[in-house]
Image: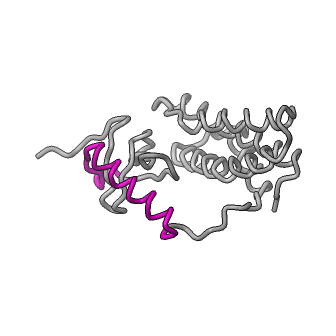
Amino acid sequence: MTEYEPRLGDTVEDTGLAKVGRVMGFVGPYVQLRPVGGGIEWDARVGSLRPVLLTDALRNGVAAANARSRGEGSTVAQDSIPVDAVTMRRTIARVFADDAVPLTAEELHDLVLLCRGHLMLLIPEVGRVGRGLPEGDVRRTGALAGIAEARRRLDLVPDEQPRARVAHARRLARSVDCLLRHVEALGGELS
C-alpha cells in the first residue's frame, strides 16, 4: 500500500489531533491545514494525514459549530484582546531585515506562522474599533478595507519556490503593519 500524498485543496483528517481540514500549503515536512468552514489553521506531518470525504468533513464541522453555539466550546471572552504591538513590530522587522544572512526555510516558516497569528488577533480588534465609527467615515472604510486585504492574504497559498515564500511572508507582514496602524489610529487596545 502506498503512503497518501496530499494535494492542495484536499480534505484530510489529522489523525494525531482528530481534526479535519483542507490542505492550504506545504512548508518543509509540514502540511498547512485549515478547518472546513474556517478557523485557526495548524500544521501537521504528512504521515498523520488520511483523506476524508467532504460530506464527512462538513458533518464534523456542523457538529463542532453546534457544540460551540451550545456553549461547549471556548470560554474566552470575545470583547477585546490587548494587542502586543511591540512583539508584532519585532516580527515585521525580522521579515524585512536586510541581513547578510538570508532566512532559513524553518525561520521563514516560523515568521509566516507568527504573522498569521498576529493577523488572527488584529482582524477582530480592528473590526471592533472600525465598526464603532459612523458609516461613511474614512477611517472606518480604511480599517475594513485593511481587514479584507488581510483575509485575502491569509487565504493565499504561496508557490514552493523560496522567493515566493519570502514574498508571501512580506505580504502578511505588510498586513500586520497596516492593521497595527489602524488599531493605533483608532484607539484600539494595545498591551
- 38 magenta-colored: no
* Residue 170 seen in render: no
Horizontally, residue 179 falls left or right of residue 3, namely right
Residue shown at 81%/62% (left/top)? 191
Q: What secondary structure predominates along the stretch shown in magenta?
A: helix
Residue 161 lies, in percent from the top left, at: 48, 29
Which of these two is toward me, 40 or 46?
A: 40
Q: Which residue range is magenta in the image? A: 45-72
Which of these two is toward me, 106 or 99?
A: 106
- 57 magenta-colored: yes
Q: In the displayed image of the protein, which residue is found farthest to the left?
A: 1
Residue shown at 32%/52% (left/top)? 59
Number of marks in picture: 0
Horizontally, residue 1 falls left or right of residue 108, namely left
Horizontally, residue 107 falls left or right of residue 43, namely right
Identify whether 44 is placed above or below 77: above
Residue 184 lies, in percent from the top left, at: 86, 48
Residue 43 lies, in percent from the top left, at: 44, 52
Horizontally, residue 14 falls left or right of residue 70, namely left
Identify whether 108 is placed above or below 40: above
Which of these two is toward me, 127 or 66?
A: 66
Residue 65 lies, in percent from the top left, at: 45, 57
- For residue 103, which quarter of the picture? top right
Residue shown at 57%/39% (left/top)? 154
Residue shown at 49%/63% (left/top)? 68
* Residue 115 seen in render: yes
